[in-house]
Image: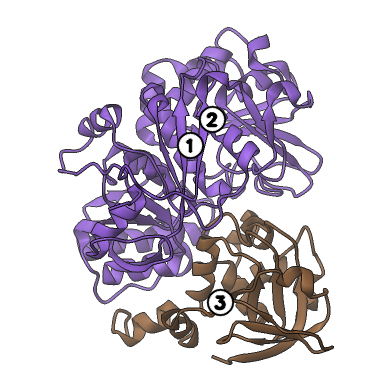
Chain colours: A brown, B purple
Amino acid sequence: MQEQVTGRAWVFGDSIDTDNMYPGYAMRMPVEQAAEHVFYAIRPEFASGVRPGDIVVAGRNFGIGSSRPVAQLFRQLGVAALVASEFNSLFFRNSVNFGLPAVTIPGVHEAIADGEQVRLDIRAARIERLAGGEPLQGAPLPEFVLEIVARGGLMAKLAADGYLPA
Amino acid sequence: MSMTIIEKILARASGSERVGAGDIVVCEIDMTVLIDLQFATMWAPPTRIADPDRLAVIMDHAVPAPTVADADGGVRAREFVKAFGIERFFDVGRHGICHQVIAENGLALPGEVLTCTDSHTCAAGAYNSAARGLGPVEVYSIMCTGRTWFQVAPTIRYELHGERAAVVSGKDVFLHIAGAYGDATNHNIEFGGPGLASLPMHDRRAIATQGAEVSADFTTFPADELCRSYLDERSDRPYQPVDPDPDARYAAVREVDLGALEPYVARPGGVSENALPVSQIERRRVDQCFIGSCANGQIEDLQIAAEVLGGRRVAPGVRLIVTPASQAVYTEAVRRGYVEALAEAGAIVTNSTCGACFGYHMGLLGAGEVCITASTRNFRGRMGSPDAEIYMASPYTVAAAAVAGEIIDPREL
């Protein structure tokens, strides 16, 4: 896992739901194609504009909704991490279990402007604007969650433990 | 020991004497349910699994298969259950929406921990279990290892009083709570109080199912006499009911007077702080009405629909779709004449599936259309076009809208 990531912040508001990121009709598509539909209704330019290393920033209750694997689509698009003031617990687990860092930093969506460059320290749960100013601090993820992310998700761990065919 | 229901269940499952909010625990999972989508998307046959007796496979989201990918998933599911000797396999024809099948077969009993690849797994909280939805890779992991971790969330308790009116259902109780109090993100919800005794099991299931819609972790009810007799008709496995300790610690205790409630409607977009009594909701013309899903495809929901539609017609220009929650509900609805009453009134009664509820197959909405639904979720774009609007209400209110062609107070019929 890359512990320090620098990229453009895509900033969203409160209660962004899973269906918004991964619409039901896209569940019929292969992951590469489904990824073109992330934020299709509220931010249609996202999928074509996002670059590897970019960071998605959101407000409260990020990811309310379904167990559909949104993180797969973010990873497909090269998103380096999710940072939110608060995560829905299913969405949080579903992200880290697919190897996508999800860091809670209260107030982050108000402190960072959409489009600006930010540096995130995943292990320290700290984000700062490259333009300057005080960094924002969250509670660091437990070590075992960081390990899941570092391995690239739960499937890699299961493979290493011999649960998957070689 | 100062524990809530969920804390007690997680303490038992993790072999801890006591757990409290903030603790991270590793729990043995009593039952895990895989659904069809899992096999259609990220499936790789495992080399070994923890315990075939603590696993069930239920075909529900995309049945009968609407795509070749879903059909291929069905092939993989059947190969898997055969290879590993999974006895609890609910294939197309003896299937249902997983949370209904879980209820009918007693797959979640008081004091147990249930996990499944669907966000509405909290439905089984109606049966005094710690049940929650998890993502597909985590459920796969539990299938392999038999366990997972939870961070114990603080619990909000709803203390129920009084008795609901006949026109009020569990859906209305939930919409009242969601409208008045909003999200419970990173919290558990526990119900109790003297009003619980008058709340039927189908209402409790609708309420527990919708815990996911206020972003809660676990939602649970105690196992009172009504709950125990419901379960004893469906399972002969032993169980131990779990009550909260008298000095359990709650993040909040909120009182609900069931007798004061009326039918509620949530406006499009979500339910939190977005639901009002029907008398305060605009009379919108509707294009589609839907009664179904794990929350509202129960036999009692179909009964209400059939009673409202019996001798009446679905209004011109309106589509009414009714989806029984399981094949068992479907056959019972046929036996009782509900399917005939609904079909004669102009409704479409579909096979049991999650299809219309999550906008995957059947009954999608076009741009500019208005829908009122008695199902689980009314996010923008949930049931088709992002330019459709989805209101949410009880089966009674939805059936009344189908007859009137617009959102009305069902008591006006």
Q: Would you say B329 lies left or right of A95 here?
A: left
Q: CA distance from mark 2 to mark 3?
A: 36 Å
Q: Nearer the viewer, mark 1 or mark 3?
A: 3
Q: CA distance from mark 1 to mark 3?
A: 33 Å
Same subunit under labels 2 and 3?
A: no
The residue to which callout 1 is attached is: B207
Q: Tag on residue B344?
A: none
Dot 2 alpha-carbon crowd within 10 angstroms: few under 14, some 14 to 19, many 20 or more: many
User: Which chain does tag 3 point to?
Assistant: A
Asked whether the residues under the numbered discs 2 and 1 touch, taking CB atoms below 8 Å apart as contact, a structural biologist would say yes
Q: Amino acid at mark 3?
A: Ala
Q: Would you say B263 lies left or right of B302 here?
A: right
The residue to which callout 3 is attached is: A139
Residue B231, x across and y down, in percent? 25, 34
Quarter of the image for residue A37 reads bottom right
Residue B142 visible, this angle: yes
Q: Secondary structure at mark 2?
A: helix
Q: Secondary structure at mark 1?
A: helix
Asked whether the residues under the numbered discs 2 and 3 touch, taking CB atoms below 8 Å apart as contact, a structural biologist would say no
User: Which chain does tag 2 point to?
Assistant: B
Q: Amino acid at mark 1?
A: Ile
Q: Amino acid at mark 2?
A: Val
Residue depicted at x 64% and y 13%: B313
Residue depicted at x 45% and y 29%: B160
Q: Would you say B291 lies left or right of B188 here?
A: right
